[in-house]
Amino acid sequence: MSPDSATGTNQLLPAVPLAALFFAAFVLPLAALVVISLFRDPQFSGLSLVQYVRFLSDPFSLKVLTDTLWLGAEVALATLILAYPLALVYVASGPFMRTLITFLIMLPLLTSTVVRTFAWIVILGRDGIVNSAMLSLGFWQAPARLLYTWEGMVLALTQIQLPLMALPLINSLLRLDRNLTRAAEGLGASRARIFVTVVLPLTLPGAIAGWLLVFAAAATAFITQTLVGGGRIILMPSHIYQQAVGVQDWPFAAALSLIFTLAVTGIVFAVGALSRRYVRGVDAA
Amino acid sequence: MRHSLIDRLYSGVVGAISGLGMLLLLAPTLVVLVISFTGGITLKFPPPSWSLRWYVELLQSQEIIEPALTSLKVAAAATILSAVLGCAAALGLARSQLKIARLLDALFMSPMVLPAMAFGLSLLLVFNLLGIRLSAATLVLGHTIICVPFVIRMVGASVQQLNPVLITCSLSLGASRWYTFRRVTLPLIRRGILASCFVAFLTSFDNVPVSLFLADARTEVLPIKLWAILEGSLDVRVAAVSGVIVLLTLAGLVCAEISGGVSRQIGSR
């Protein structure tokens, strides 16, 4: 291939239409979002940072933000605990089991979010599976409230986001040099010890990649948050939606969504950068 | 063996948790399918009796069928747009060493990183400020942006695996650029394109954060409609819709798997 600059830029020509579309329908709107967040009130009567001050001095909004980030962190941790054994079994098994696990992971990934959330409404509802099982087994005297609780929401999100954690972990484990675990085995280490001292440190990048994916997905999961969490648990996505569509306070909604975006992507980039700096192991990508 | 007890305990824990994980992955889909055949009028599980009444009811529910058709149309349009524009861009960017190519690649991937709600809201505000009325077209525009990253990644990966010598050969043997593209490049990246179309379609069909702001009363889409129904009441018709979606997705997955190995394409991301 000729390396001269003329053909170099010519090669990029096919990317021009998409670049134009992205400029008009992605870059420009986001720039507008920043500008709108700087207006003093919904009537656009003057520029100031008042929306950001309003957010920072409002304990309710601050709590909504920290709750949302905490939800993401909690769900990501829960998926990590579930996904590691799943990935270990995947790597250790034969072709049939691998196809089965791949299918099980792909199934929820491809099924609509509303459908998956609906399934959890059926499972956790008053007459749902958990309640009827516990009642008929005699463990509970009366149906418990599982839907519209924080724990129910974490459980549902954990299942819904599990594939996002399992895929990078499996990739990471597949890239692990088997000679290392065999060497540890040969030197007499127990399997638990091999996991803690060899497998875990070397697949940590995959775990962190999965953790970040699930964190971002769970924090922004509007449907599951509103339907399983219910109206009393208010998190950033529904807060933004309320301000934008319900109250029609666009400057505040714009500021909220920018703060939320910065918080989520900030954490993703910071953790990603820290892990690249301090964690050595096989790459998940 | 000194370690046998610890080893057995470790295997037990790993086995138990992975079993639980697999059950968790499968259960909700099964639950949805089972409850959709209930004869009762609530989401009571296990169903008190069996019937197809909710599917019959669904066939008569114009207010659900119409959003479903809108969703299918919007998803088809967004898939075609993102596939055509995304493929062209992926082919252009794949072999370029220029800095601007990497910048563009990062730009095209960024909808994946950014919380989609912020993007949906920003589009709504811009359309409003410019006086553009919300319609199916504005919705397709938003969905296209959300779908592009999948096309760029998956088609880009296919292009990376393509041996450039094949193209040089074809050109040096006198084939035109267009003929080379049609007969050499396209067949070799076909699987990547098909897999990315499959994922793009599902992404658009399932999209909520963008549709939430851009779908107006006339262009209601299915996920938003179902969300609105479920927020108001626990309507069993949603179970029938879910059953249909699950079965169609399964059928699509099987077709895509046979024609191009989608799971491998997605798994290798």
Image (tube, coloured by chain):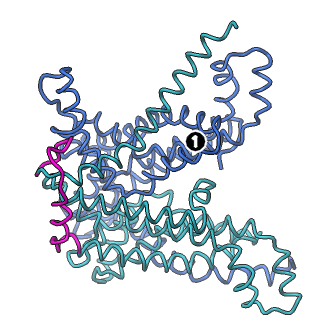
Q: Quadrant of residue A17?
A: bottom right
Q: Which chain is cyan?
A: B
Please tell me whether residue B208 is drawn above or below residue A159 in the rendered image.
below
Q: Which residue is mark 1?
A: A97
* Region of the chain picked out in magenta, as a range: B41-65
Q: Amino acid at mark 1?
A: Met
Q: Quadrant of the N terminus of chain B?
A: top right
Residue A148 visible to an observer of this rendering = no
Q: Position of residue B75 (x, y in %)?
A: 40, 74
Is residue B62 located in the magenta-colored stretch of the structure? yes
Q: Residue at x 48, y 29 (%)?
A: B17
Q: Is residue A260 left or right of residue B53?
A: right
Q: Which chain is blue?
A: A
Please tell me whether residue A231 is drawn above or below residue B157 in the rendered image.
above
SS type, badge 1: helix
Nearest the eye: B31 or B154: B31
Q: Position of residue B25 (x, y in %)?
A: 42, 43
Q: Position of residue B28 (x, y in %)?
A: 34, 45
Q: Quadrant of residue B183?
A: bottom right
Chain letter belonging to callout 1: A
